[in-house]
Amino acid sequence: MSLRECAVCSKPVKTKTAVTCSYSCSNTHFRSGPNNPNWKDDNYQSTCFYYHGKKCLVCGEDKIVAAHHVNHDHHDNRPENLVPLCPTHHQYVHSRYSEEVTPIIDKYLETFGV
């Protein structure tokens, strides 16, 4: 009988029906992201922070972070259209200073796979 790997840490799973190796890994797997029964794909903030982390792309601020729609279409909640920005840099994007922030966002999106 071959052992399966834990979906979180890749350690061997000891039972036939388990997806994870421990309660800790189970909490990580099922209580975050799309595996959570309460996950909503239409919540753009959750989607943004799940795929990109909750940290401003420009300055690294992690206390107050907003999700910015890159193409300015608020109905387009694909991960590649969302980026995390602090309130200051989010305001830069929507002002005459956007050229100071836009190249950083574009460079990040190139590495993200867009």
Image (cartoon, grey):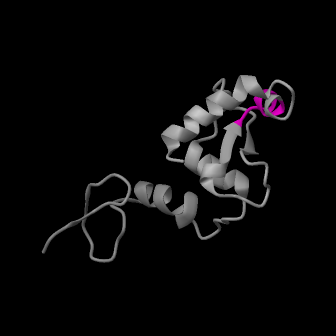
**Is 2 situated left or right of 34 in this image?**
left
* Image x and y of residue 82, in percent: 67, 48
- Which portion, as a residue range, is magenta? 85-91
The single residue placed furthest to the left in the displayed view is 1
State whether residue 29 is above or below residue 87.
below
Occupied quadrant, residue 2: bottom left
Residue at 47% in and 59% down: 29
**Is 21 situated left or right of 45 in this image?**
left
Please state which of residues 59 and 80 is positioned toward the viewer in this rendering: 80
Residue at 37% in and 59% down: 22
Tell me if residue 27 is in the magenta stretch.
Answer: no
Please state which of residues 7 and 76 is positioned toward the viewer in this rendering: 76
Residue at 38% in and 55% down: 8
Occupied quadrant, residue 18: bottom left
**Is 45 situated left or right of 74 in this image?**
left
* Image x and y of residue 101, in percent: 71, 27
Name the quadrant of the N terminus: bottom left
State whether residue 41 is above or below residue 53.
below
One can see residue 57 in this view: no
* Image x and y of residue 86, in percent: 74, 32
* Image x and y of residue 108, in percent: 56, 35
Residue at 65% in and 28% down: 103
The single residue placed furthest to the right in the displayed view is 95
Does the magenta stretch mainly form a helix, a strand or a loop?
Answer: helix
Label count reads 0
One can see residue 109 in this view: yes
Please state which of residues 5 and 46 is positioned toward the viewer in this rendering: 46
